[in-house]
Each structure stands twice: as C-alpha cells, then as structure tokens.
Image (spheres, rainbow, N blue to C red):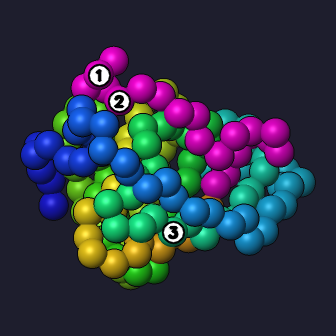
Amino acid sequence: MHSRAQSPARSRNTAYVPSPRGNVLATGTVRHQLPELGTHASHVVLRRLTIAPGGSTGWHYHLGRLLVLVESGELTHHEADGTSTTQRAGTCFAEEPGPGRTHCGSNLGQVPLTLYVTYFLPDPASPLAVPVPDPDTA
C-alpha cells in the first residue's frame, strides 16, 4: 500500500512519540565477506524490536543491508520522498543501505508492533542506524 498522506512520523507537531525498544538476540562475525549483502558486510546482528502504538523509529538510514520480519502488528515504512508502504504480520522485506535510503518506521495501529531485524554491517563497531533530520523539517 502506497500513500502520500501526512503521518505522525512526518508531523511537525511536538507531541510525544514513544521510542522503540530493542533487544539484541545474537551477533556474529562472518569469516568471509558477503558481497551479495553489500560491500564489506562482515558482521551480523539479530535484534527483536518492539514499537508501541503511536511509536516511531525516527528518521534514519543503515550502513548495511537489513532483512526485516514483521512478527505482529503493522509497520508503516515512510520514505524521504513522501511515499509509504504498510507491512503486516507475517511479511518479510529487505532494506537497502546508505544515506540515499533515509526512512522512518511507525506503528500507526492499536497494538504493539514486533519486528525481527537482521543487520548485515561492515564491522562490529558499526551503528545499527544513523539518525537524520526529518526531511520535512530539514
């Protein structure tokens, strides 16, 4: 589902938006680089992320490719160009890395959103996400 409607994540008001809660479940280092997962992907992190109703990840991008599985709830994935998609429980999708792939994830539903995210990162010191300003206010 694609939409250009204004979302809470893109809103300019100062209302409180709950932050996601995440638990790293496992990490590991790849012995050989995995070029199919991005340049120099050598570290893998598996994380369970919960976003409360009305919550958001905030605007960000990643340094490596991600694989995301929606366990419960619905994720609204906002793109910097103003479009959005909705991913429902049981769906899986990939996110591409880099500052050209700025996005924000929101839970616009009434129940908690739970995601399992596998990060393929350049090295163990890589951040899971790089925060950026909201494109509407930047």
Residue in front for this viewpoint, 88 or 22? 22
Residue pictured at 68% horizontal, 67% vertical: 23
**Where is residue 121 shown, x and y percent of the image?**
70, 45
| Pointer 2 residue | 134
The circle on residue 137 is 1
Amino acid type assigned to the residue bearing label 1 in the image:
Thr
| Pointer 3 residue | 50
Residue pictured at 79% horizontal, 47% vertical: 42
Q: Is residue 97 visible?
A: yes
* Picture quadrant of residue 29: bottom right
The span from disc 2 to disc 3 (Cα, nearest Å) is 21 Å
Q: Residue most toward the right?
A: 31
**Where is residue 112 shown, x and y percent of the image?**
40, 75
Callouts 2 and 1 close, C-beta under 8 Å: yes
Query: At numbered mark 1, what does the secondary structure look like: helix, strand or loop?
Result: loop
Q: Is residue 125 magenta?
A: yes
Query: At numbered mark 2, what does the secondary structure look like: helix, strand or loop?
Result: loop
Residue range corresponding to the magenta coloring: 119-138
Give the overall secondary structure of the magenta segment: loop
Q: Residues within 10 Å of mark 1 (few under 14, many from 20)?
A: few
The span from disc 2 to disc 1 (Cα, nearest Å) is 5 Å
Q: Residue most toward the top?
A: 138
Quadrant including the N terminus: bottom left
Residue in front for this viewpoint, 93 or 110? 110
**Where is residue 91 shown, x and y percent of the image?**
37, 75
Callouts 3 and 1 close, C-beta under 8 Å: no
For residue 120, side relative to residue 62 (left or right)? right
Amino acid type assigned to the residue bearing label 3 in the image:
Thr
